Image (cartoon, helix red, strand yellow):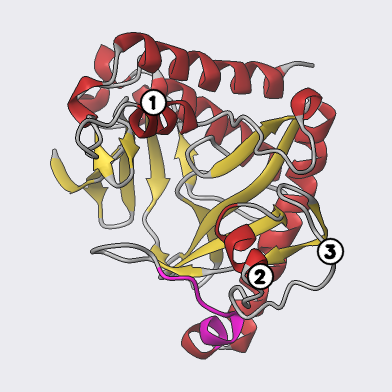
Amino acid sequence: MKKIADGKVREIYEVSKDRLVIVTTDRISAFDVVLPKTVPNKGKLLNAISLFWFNRTKEIIPNHIISSDLSDMPEFFQKREFVRRAVLVKRLKILPFECIVRGYVFGNMWDAYSAKREFCGHKIAGNYELAQKLDAPIFTPSTKAHVGHDEYISFKHMETELGSDLANRVKTLSLKLYDVCYQYAYEKGLIIADTKFEFGLDSEKNLVLADEIFTPDSSRFWNLDEYKVGVSPKSYDKQFVRDWLLNNKIGGEMQFNSVPDEVLTKTSEIYAECLRRLQNA
């Protein structure tokens, strides 16, 4: 089976000219470095969370999922190692932008706001504290860099590259997806502070939702019960690993090869708790 991409977390295989299989591994990256150790069951948990959201949002926009059943995939994938990790998807022409929606003043937006700078073409008006909810979510796209870091851009830049019609459709759908899923997660005791989407065009030029959605790898989840304005909230994501790396430097260098097993196990538990909350009826 031909592997056409080997990312930090996902591996992509070519099945035919119009179909791919994406396998989500247990690998974890922090500060753009893939750790030598893996997070137990991370791939299965990410896959389950993403499939959960794809199913809930398919009436808003079609997505690239064809099947998560291994029997629908080539024999190569009908092995234990691919169970709950592999999905058969439509092959798309992926748009070259990360479509980010932010509902709270945090991260890079907070840095820009604190310095009174514009962020992705937005001048954030009003008096905000760290982690405070915005009056309304905003769309803050970025480029998708093949080498180095993504670059934040204005929506006008995106319009120039994609054309006004397609860019506005992407923006409108991104905000709609965030609004609908934010409300659902909030009822489950989770705050989706921000998230990112990827979109692509199918062979008939239809806009399709791709990659992963509303996972701890692509979104910032906070516990509603612990949330306080002005305080950096604990996240349901790999921040637990990042914090260990930041707090255990030797000679100013992060110890990527020395992350303890218990930190990785705790990270797995954080991802599992996120899934449990979402699925809780």
Residue 152 x %, y %: 48, 71
Residue that appears at 47% across and 86% down: 161
The circle drawn on residue 254 is none
Q: Label 1: few (<14), some or many (≥20) within 10 Å?
A: some
The front one of 129 and 139 is 129
Give yes or no for contact between labels 1 and 2 (Cβ–Cβ under 8 Å): no
Q: Is residue 153 magenta?
A: yes
Q: Is residue 246 left or right of residue 60?
A: left
Label whose residue precedes the other's in the sequence (1 or 2):
2
Q: Residue furthest left?
A: 2
The part of the chain drawn in magenta is 151-159
For numbered disc 2, what is the local secondary structure?
helix
Residue that appears at 57% across and 43% down: 219
Above or below, 177 against 44 in this view is: below
CA separation, marks 3 and 1?
32 Å
Residue 169 x %, y %: 66, 73
Q: Label 3: few (<14), some or many (≥20) within 10 Å?
A: few
The circle drawn on residue 171 is 2
Residue that appears at 68% across and 33% down: 222
Give yes or no for contact between labels 3 and 1 (Cβ–Cβ under 8 Å): no
Q: Label 2: few (<14), some or many (≥20) within 10 Å?
A: many
The front one of 65 and 168 is 168
The circle drawn on residue 244 is 1
The residue that mark 3 highlights is 127
CA separation, marks 1 and 2?
36 Å
